[in-house]
Image: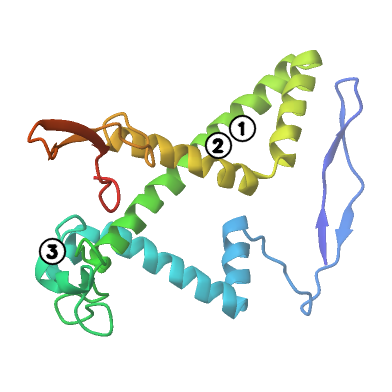
Amino acid sequence: MTTQHQPVDTGGGTTLPAEPSTQDSRPGDTVVAGRSPARMAWRRIRRDKFTTAALVATLLFIAIALLAPVLTAVTGWQPITPDNKAINPDTGNFPYGSLGGIGAEHLLGVEPGTGYDLFARIVYGLRTSLYVGFASAVLSTAVGVVAGLAAGYFGGWVDSLLSRIMDVMLAFPQLLFIIALTPVIQNALQTNTHGGRRSGSTPSTTTATRTSSPAGSASASASPAPWPCGPS
């Protein structure tokens, strides 16, 4: 048993000793130590096997994305380096073999039509996804902090306006918006690729075919040019 004496100020400049206070300390009492949020989160992750497996897979993907140049240097193929020997022109540039060209040279095969190494394209795709994910997280956090500070500092109509904007953004179906926006982006990319001509447009080029009449005079007739298989 411990006794503590704390002085008490009476307000008139005189300090009187306080009544002794007692605090029981028993040998069998359990002392609860404080834990930080990071330590609590790590403890919960270790308890859940599925969460632990997901964490390991995420760290593995991040490591592969960061080591993409090293991995492609080992395999010897870059994501935009075609392997024309791995595709068969007689079958429409499909890869040789029944597994899409999978082998010691191409771990995941090659892309039909182009001969690009799929392993290199996947690891560099992970790298791009990692950049986009971190950039979007940082940008959204910065915008959210600034908007929250502005709403809390100014209040009034600023708070109401920002709150309504956030309600609309959270209630809007983002997946539907992405699906609707995909054809627009594809058309824009195809327009830039084909030099200002939209994919699927009909060319106005005509070819002149000279024919001979029974009288021997030559005449010219215009016929539409044949459209090649696929846009050039």
The residue shown at (55%, 37%) is 140
> Which circle marks residue 73 in the picture?
3
Q: Which residue is more in the foreground, 34 or 170? A: 170
Q: Left or right: 92 with respect to 168?
A: left
* Displayed quadrant of residue 212: top left
Q: Secondary structure at mark 1?
A: helix
In the displayed structure image, the side of residue 186 where residue 141 appears, left or right: right
Q: Is residue 145 above or below residue 232?
A: above
Q: CA distance from mark 1 to mark 3?
A: 40 Å
**Residue at the extreme left:** 216
Q: Position of residue 228 (x, y in %)?
A: 25, 49
Image quadrant containing the N terminus: bottom right
- Determine whether, in the image, residue 150 is placed left or right of residue 18: left
- Which element type, helix, strand or loop, lies under badge 2? helix
Tell me, yes or no, whether the two marked residues, 2 and 3, touch with CB atoms within 8 Å.
no
At 33% across and 56% down in the image, what residue appears?
125
Q: Which amino acid does the dot numbered 2 rest on?
A: Ser
Which mark is on residue 72?
none
Q: Nearer the viewer, mark 1 or mark 3?
A: 3
**Mark 2 vs 3, N-terminal side:** 3
Along the horizontal axis of the image, is 54 left or right of 208? right
Q: Which mark is residue 144?
A: 1
Task: For the residues labelled 1 and 3, say whether their Cβ atoms are less than 8 Å apart.
Answer: no
Question: Closer to the N terminus: mark 1 or mark 3?
Answer: 3
Above or below, 222 against 40 in this view is: above
10 Å crowding of disc 3: few (<14), some (14-19), many (20+): few
